[in-house]
Amino acid sequence: MPCRICGQSTRTVLDLGEMPPANGLKEAKEDPDVVHPLVLENCESCKNIQLRDCLDAAQLYRHYLYLTPESPTLSKHYEDLTAHLYREGYVSADSRVLEIGSNVGHFLKYLQPGVKKVMGIDPAENVCRIAEDHGVETLPEFFGLDAVEPVRERLGDPSIIVARHCCAHNENPHSILEGVAALLPDDGYFVMENAYVLDTLKQTDFGQIYHEHMFYFAIQPVMRLFEAHDLKLIDVVMSPIHGGSIVFIASPNRSADQERPSVAHYLGEETKALDRALIEGFAEHVRTIARDLTQQVNGLVDEGASIWAYGATAKAATLLNYVGITDQLVPYCADSTPIKHGKFIPMANVEIRPEQEAFAAKPDYFLITAWNYKDELIAKAKHFAGPECRFIIPVPEVRII
Ligand code: DWN
């Protein structure tokens, strides 16, 4: 498949086999599993990493089961990001803020008190209704050129457009960027946050690979993507959220004094680090984790231990299914999201239950399948289920706490 950023040829990095869509939770264990190839490929020309086979976005996102959780880790991230946006002058009391892929509106809720107006746009109709109930006006649509006028009618001209963890979720990110370029005034800003590929590779965070993540963004291909729409990358912020994320800030204003030193700094680091050895080492390490985790979990179950997964994440589907852990070894997964309860992680057939039920069951081990929230999940489980609880952490290497 040619690179969907620059059009050059790509090579396969890792083939995870046939996998179900990660958020395609099943109503019943007996429901058939629908699977599609999950193959990661790399363009050595622009350094883009992408999925070879992309699923239809409407199929993935029109009804969506991922609702942004309540989490101190996430709240801290919102505070840090908001503080940066104000400090650097990207947001002020006069700002009109559009968020693309705004989910239940948590981030906009943060910004709402300090700016003129906020508005979200998200393709999942069920999620938009929740956001509206929270007081965040949200248009139930995909963002692109077609959405420009409907947004303008409701919000006016946005001075800043935010897109957190959604631009890599689309086979053709150019379609989003076209809409951004059409809507943003010359003195406006575009803020795009994604899992950062260097962190994904260095942490062997292969749970990030699932059909929703069609790109694994690095600075170099993103600069090309922005340039194609006359946007200039002017700032880069790194964050530990979701196992290591990057925030790209771009502007149509191309004057040289806009660019912060962060761009050259992180671009320099990335250029040195993102090479074939890192990518091939990652693929090798994924196989090591799969082997170690299967051995560890099988060994514990053979000794009579009970294990629940914790966090019915999209990453859980990739981890469990690639490693080959099913309900035979791990029958249940604890999760705080009510609409996931009673459903089953596809293929692995692990049933999702409320957290309090897990704490009452007091399993011997929790397999932490939301390792991006590891510290707060461990603290919660110890508090409610008892200090003797033990935890299996799958990445960056398998270990027991
Ligand atoms: O990019 C994406 C990221 C940002 O969010 C999407 N494609 C889908 C989703 O991925 P994920 O499912 O891997 O996301 P999270 O945020 O790691 O999911 C956390 C899960 O853990 C949620 O289902 C809620 C649950 N949870 C919990 O049960 N107790 C979370 C916390 C903080 C808790 O205390």
Image (spheres, rainbow, N blue to C red):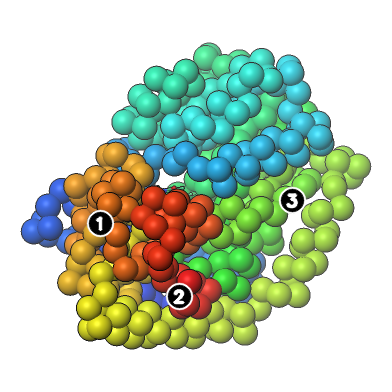
Q: Which residue is mark 3?
A: 236
The answer to whether the residue bearing label 1 lies less than 8 angstroms from the nearest atom of ligand 1 is no
Looking at the image, is mark 2 or mark 1 earlier in the sequence? Answer: 1
Residue toward you, 313 or 385: 385
Residue 253 image point, x, y percent: 80, 36
Compared with 116, 178 (above or below) is: below
Q: Residue at x 44, y 52 (%)?
A: 383
CB under 8 Å between discs 3 and 1: no
Residue 244 location (% of width, % of height):
60, 59
Q: CA–CA distance between discs 2 and 3?
A: 35 Å
> Label 1, on which residue?
361
Residue 290 percent coordinates (x, y): 38, 80
Q: Could you tell me if residue 353 is visible in this image?
A: yes
Mark sitting earlier along the chain (3/1): 3
The amino acid type found where label 3 is placed reads Val
Label 2, label 1: how many angstroms apart (C-alpha)?
A: 20 Å
- Element carrying mark 2: strand
Disc 2: CA contacts within 10 A as few (<14), some (14-19) or many (>=20): few
Marks 3 and 1, Cα distance to the nearest angstrom?
44 Å
Above or below residue 364? Residue 80 is above
Q: Amino acid at mark 2?
A: Ile
Mark 2 against mark 3, which lies toward the viewer?
A: 2
Quadrant of residue 340 in the image?
top left
Sequence-earlier tag: 2 or 3: 3
How packed mark 1 is, by other alpha carbons closer than 10 Å (few <14, some 14-19, many 20 or more), is few
Of labels 2 and 1, the one closer to you: 1
Task: Give the residue at the far front of this rendering.
Answer: 387
> Could you tell me which residue is drawn at 33 percent across and 48 percent down?
355
Mark sitting on residue 400: 2
